[in-house]
């Protein structure tokens, strides 16, 4: 059996830890630049506020119903995520789990043959609630896809199932699949759900009645695996985190920027963050790309977008070297007279840090920088993000968050935040 531990309205739950007076009140958390709703309390959902709703379109509703809105506090959410992961994984062997996202992880309970799994998971849930102060729902089932189904059920009826629900019989599975809308099946989504409905597939159970050749034609081998998962036949195993094949740090600015040095500082900062992520997974990149873009929705302003790529003579993860390259590329594409709204840096074509092939005709200074970079990463891990940085970085956040609560400001002053499993830049 698998168990899916899923934090309830995770960002909102974190806000309520900082400010308990928010309990039972409509609360939303906003994305980068305070643009869209990325987390909603049950009370906010009841008001009809959809996920991804543009905040400016709902400001009147926020005011009418006294909906509390907050900028995302990513650093804090990372810390709480680590607490939940640490508690959950202490209940299984060190390889029997998969961190799926910042607020979800799978546990493999296959070896627990002589215990009551429901009571065991109820203990996990209660301990997370008591120690991390985060409410979670746990769905238990023979496959990962059915875990998602069980979790959806327990989230809709938390009081009925005490936050834990188990799909452990054919009768339970059939009843759940006849209840679940097809677009809510893990891996289907809204777009594919429309095609399914056009072919008479309205519920998850209807998909199981279709011939395998029909499913394979529409969804390929992925669809066949999905059907088996829904039948309770395990197809998806736990996955260990793998190094990324490319890294991108891109941002929309809260306000359009017209000063060259302001845009340069943001772009160079993005390059530093890419370098940091490379070092975290012990890889070096061979290719660096920089882009800038104006606001495509402002038809009254001249439009401009440009990207440029450079292949490095030697693979590197040095912030100093990548910063220089990013600056050169920025100079090549920047043009005066435009209002810039978005920019970013991407690095790809990775090699392991200890398997770099050096160009004989180019000076290699990676190893000279590496001790400094490692020391900088170590200090930032100990004392918090960007406490030690290069001179070209301002140290200001790249999110444009204006609705940070006083409680959070106090938390930052009184705590040192460790590096977390999930990092938002």
Image (tube, grey):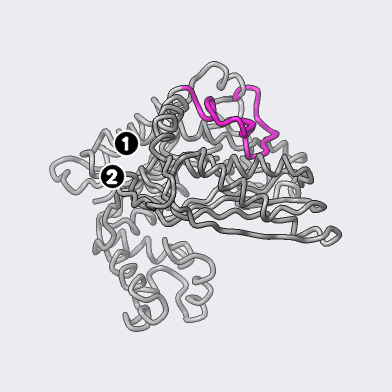
* Image position of 273 (left or right of 144): right
Question: Which residue lies under the disc numbered 1?
Answer: 88
**Residue 335 coordinates in the image, percent (x, y):** 75, 54
Asked whether residue 165 is in view, the answer is no
Q: Which dot marks residue 97?
A: 2
Q: Nearer the viewer, residue 317 or 146?
A: 317
**Residue 146 coordinates in the image, percent (x, y):** 33, 58
Looking at the rendered structure, the secondary structure element under dot 2 is strand
Q: Quadrant of the C terminus?
A: top right
Residue closest to the far right: 300
User: Dot 1 surroundings within 10 Å: few (below 14), some, or many (20 or more)?
Assistant: many
Q: Nearer the viewer, residue 389 or 245?
A: 389
Instruction: Locate residue 145: give its quadrant.
Output: bottom left
Residue displayed at 35% across by 79% down: 216
Is 152 above or below relative to 31?
below
Sequence-first disc among 1 and 2: 1
Residue displayed at 67% across by 60% down: 306
* Image position of 211 (left or right of 57): left
Taking the magenta stretch, the answer to whether it contains residue 281 is no
Residue displayed at 30% across by 49% down: 355
First to last magenta residue range: 383-408
Is 150 above or below relative to 44?
below
Q: Nearer the viewer, residue 282 or 402?
A: 282
User: Dot 2 surroundings within 10 Å: few (below 14), some, or many (20 or more)?
Assistant: many
Residue closest to the far front: 361
User: Mark 1 and 2 residues: CB-CB less than 8 Å, in contact?
Assistant: yes
**Residue 106 coordinates in the image, percent (x, y):** 32, 47
Residue displayed at 40% across by 31% down: 374
Q: What distance separates the C-alpha of mark 1 from that of mark 2?
A: 9 Å
**Residue 369 coordinates in the image, percent (x, y):** 44, 34
């Amino acid at each position: 059996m698998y168990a899916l531990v899923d934090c309830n309205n995770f960002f909102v739950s974190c806000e309520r830890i900082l400010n308990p007076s928010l309990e039972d009140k409509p609360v939303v958390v906003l994305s980068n630049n305070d643009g869209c709703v990325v987390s909603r309390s049950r009370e906010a959902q009841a008001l009809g506020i959809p996920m991804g709703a543009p905040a400016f379109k709902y400001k009147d509703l926020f005011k009418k119903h006294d909906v509390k809105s907050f900028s995302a506090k990513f650093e804090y959410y990372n810390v709480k995520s680590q607490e939940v992961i640490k508690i959950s994984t202490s209940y299984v062997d060190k390889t029997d789990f998969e961190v799926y996202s910042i607020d979800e992880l799978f546990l493999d309970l296959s070896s627990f043959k002589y215990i009551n799994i429901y009571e065991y998971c109820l203990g996990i849930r209660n301990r997370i609630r008591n120690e991390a102060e985060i409410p979670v729902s746990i769905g238990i089932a023979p496959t990962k896809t059915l875990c998602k189904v069980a979790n959806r059920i327990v989230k809709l009826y938390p009081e009925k199932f005490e936050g834990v629900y188990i799909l452990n019989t054919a009768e339970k599975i059939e009843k759940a699949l006849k209840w679940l809308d097809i677009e809510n099946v893990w891996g289907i989504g809204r777009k594919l759900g429309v095609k399914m409905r056009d072919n008479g597939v309205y519920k998850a159970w209807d998909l199981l009645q279709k011939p395998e050749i029909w499913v394979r034609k529409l969804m390929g081998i992925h669809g066949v695996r999905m059907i088996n998962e829904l039948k309770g036949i395990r197809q998806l195993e736990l996955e260990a985190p793998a190094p990324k094949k490319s890294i991108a740090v891109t941002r929309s600015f809260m306000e359009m920027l017209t000063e060259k040095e302001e845009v340069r500082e943001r772009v160079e900062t993005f390059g530093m963050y890419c370098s940091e992520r490379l070092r975290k997974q012990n890889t070096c990149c061979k290719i660096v790309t920089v882009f800038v873009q104006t606001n495509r929705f402002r038809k009254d302003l001249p439009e401009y977008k440009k990207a440029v790529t450079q292949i490095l003579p030697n693979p590197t993860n040095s912030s100093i070297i990548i910063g220089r390259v990013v600056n050169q590329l920025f100079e090549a594409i920047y043009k005066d007279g435009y209002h810039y709204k978005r920019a970013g840096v991407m690095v790809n074509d990775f090699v392991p840090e200890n398997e770099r092939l050096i160009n004989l005709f180019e000076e290699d200074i990676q190893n000279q920088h590496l001790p400094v970079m490692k020391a900088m990463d170590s200090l930032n891990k100990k004392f918090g993000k960007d406490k030690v940085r290069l001179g070209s970085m301002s140290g200001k956040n790249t999110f444009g968050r204006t609705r940070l609560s006083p409680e959070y400001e106090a938390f930052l002053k009184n705590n040192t935040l460790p590096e977390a499993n999930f990092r938002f830049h």
